[in-house]
Image: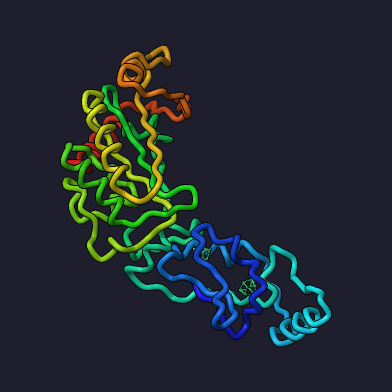
Amino acid sequence: MRIDQNKCVACANCIPVCPMGAIYIDPKVNRATINTEACVECGNCLRGMSQEHLNPTMVRTVRKMAKAVRLRFEPEPDVCPTAAFFMNELEMPRLVRQVFSDPVVEHKSTGIKGRGTEEVKTNDVVPRVDIGEVGYTIEFGRPGVGVYFRDIQEMTRELGLLGARFEPNNPITHMMIDKKTGDVREDILNEKILSGIVEIKTTIGETEAILDAVRRVNKRIDTVMAVGISTRCDENGEDKVLGPQLEEWGYSFARAKTNMGLGRITNIKKKEEAHDEHLASVR
Ligand code: SF4
Ligand code: SF4
C-alpha cells in the first residue's frame, strides 16, 4: 500500500483505520506515511474510507487560511479527501502479506486456495475429524496484532515434533516445505500477516501434549493466539470422552459450534472414497 505524498493533506483520518497502527503523520514532511514493516497489506485504509477527489492544493490552502483565524477545516472522519491511497503491485515474498490479510484478494501464484479455511464446518461431508480424533484450530494475530511467519513456524515445528497431522487444504500448510516437520518456506519467514490459522489433528490421547506445546510456544512468540478444538459427538450428540478429559486437565471450555449433520453424505461409497482420499492426502 502506498500514500501519494503529493495528494496527502495530513488530515490524519486514516490513522485509526489501520488495524496494525502502521500509518503516522511524518513531522519531517507533514504527510501521512506507512511503516512498511508494520503494514500487512490488508487494504483496509483504501477500502475503509470514502475516497474524495478534492484538489490537494485547494484543501491545504483552505486549512492554512482557517488555521490563521483559529478555525479548523477537517474532512468527514471516514474520508480521505484527496484519494491519496493506492495499491502498488506486490511480488513474493511481500505478496504473501496481502494474500493472508486482504479478504478480497486471492492469488493463485502462491498456491493458496483462498485465504480462509473451512476448519471443521464441513466435517459431516468430509470427515476430517473422525471418531477418536481431535481437530485443532490455532489462530494467531487476531485482533489487531498480526503475526510473522517465523512465529507460526515456531509453533508448527513443535507440533511436527509431536507427530501432529497438518490439514492439507489449509493455506498455512500450503506455505510449508515439509508437512511433517512443519518447516515453512524460508523466503516468507519475515513476512507479517493480519492473522493465520494452523489446523492439525491428532488422536484424543495426544491432546494433552498438544495443548502443553501450544502453551509453551505461546510464551516464546510475540503475538496473541486462540485455540479451538473439536471432536465427533456420539449418536446422542454428546461428547463423553474429550470434554471430561479437558476438565480433568484444568481447562474450562464451552461448546462454540455444533455441526448438525445436515450435510451428511447418504452415498456411503462416496463417503468412503472421500475418507480414503483424505487419508491419502495426509500421508
Ligand atoms: S486520509 Fe488521506 S489526506 Fe488524510 S492523512 Fe490520510 S492519506 Fe493523507
Ligand atoms: S494496508 Fe492495512 S496494514 Fe497497511 S497501511 Fe493500509 S490498513 Fe494499515
Quarter of the figure with residue 78 = bottom right
Q: Can residue 114 be seen?
A: no
Q: Is residue 107 left or right of residue 77?
A: left
Spot occupied by residue 245 in the image (x, y as percentages of width and height): 31, 18
Quarter of the figure with residue 64 = bottom right
Spot occupied by residue 243 in the image (x, y as percentages of width and height): 36, 19
- 72 in relation to 153, above or below: below
Residue at 24% from the left image edge and 39% from the top image edge:
277
Spot occupied by residue 39 in the image (x, y as percentages of width and height): 45, 65
- 65 in relation to 274, above or below: below
Color style of the picture = rainbow
Q: Is residue 113 left or right of residue 181?
A: right
Q: Can residue 142 be seen?
A: yes
Spot occupied by residue 77 in the image (x, y as percentages of width and height): 71, 63
Q: How many marks?
A: 0
Of residues 202 and 245, the one nearer the viewer is 245
> Quarter holding the C terminus?
top left
Residue at 38% from the left image edge and 49% from the top image edge:
223
Q: Is residue 100 left or right of residue 21?
A: left
Residue at 38% from the left image edge and 36% from the top image edge:
227
Of residues 149 and 239, the one nearer the viewer is 149
Residue at 28% from the left image edge and 61% from the top image edge:
189
Q: Is residue 120 left or right of residue 64?
A: left
